[in-house]
Amino acid sequence: MAFNAHEVLEAAWKNGPFAERMLWQALAQLAVGVTHIQRGNPKGARTLLTRAATRLTEFRPEDEADAPYGIDRAGLIAYAEALLAAVDAQRPIAPEELKPRLCG
């Protein structure tokens, strides 16, 4: 499921409004990071989750109080960081932990 989400998010990243491209890129990378966890690739997961968290942190919507489409950027940053901590600790990650909430 995460890989399918990546396909849709990548299209939004490459074809969406310029001001939103970093957001869509970050979400696509988050989806690929989750896919790497599902496939047992911690190195790939770490790389993509780190990129996703960085881009989500760097993304600044024109109106900081009005995130595009109600996306919970802070919540997704915390989610990516929690997954990174689990990967680094080599802690098993349950399937239900691999379902991020995009909106608060």
Image (tube, rainbow, N blue to C red):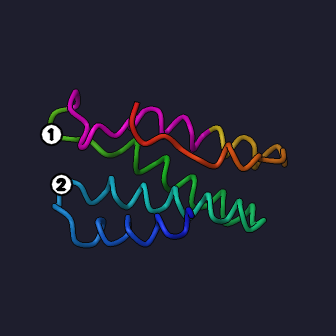
Depth order, front residue of 66/99: 99
Residue appearing at x 42%, y 42% in the figure = 102
Q: Is residue 7 above or below residue 90?
A: below
Residue appearing at x 25%, y 37% in the figure = 67
User: Residue 52: where, in percent of width, then height?
Assistant: 48, 53
User: Residue 94: where, in percent of width, then height?
Assistant: 76, 46
Give left or right: position of 23 versus 92: left
Depth order, front residue of 8/75: 8
- Looking at this view, name the residue that lies furthest to the top: 65
Task: Locate residue 26: give its quadrant.
Answer: bottom left
> Which label sits on residue 80?
none
Q: Which residue is mark 1?
A: 62
Q: Which element type, helix, strand or loop, lies under badge 2?
A: helix
Do the residues bearing badges 2 and 1 touch, measured as CB atoms within 8 Å?
yes
Q: Residues within 10 Å of mark 1 (few under 14, many from 20)?
A: few
User: Residue 80: where, in percent of width, then height?
Assistant: 57, 44
Marks 2/1: CA distance? Answer: 8 Å
Residue 68 colored magenta? Answer: yes
Q: Is residue 80 above or below residue 39?
A: above
Magenta stretch in the rendered image: 64-81
Give left or right: position of 42 versus 70: right
Q: What secondary structure characterizes most of the magenta part? A: helix
Q: Which element type, helix, strand or loop, lies under badge 1?
A: loop
Q: Is residue 30 above or below residue 15?
A: above
Residue appearing at x 29%, y 66% in the figure = 12
Give left or right: position of 37 versus 68: right
Residue appearing at x 23%, y 43% in the figure = 68
Q: Which residue is mark 2?
A: 19
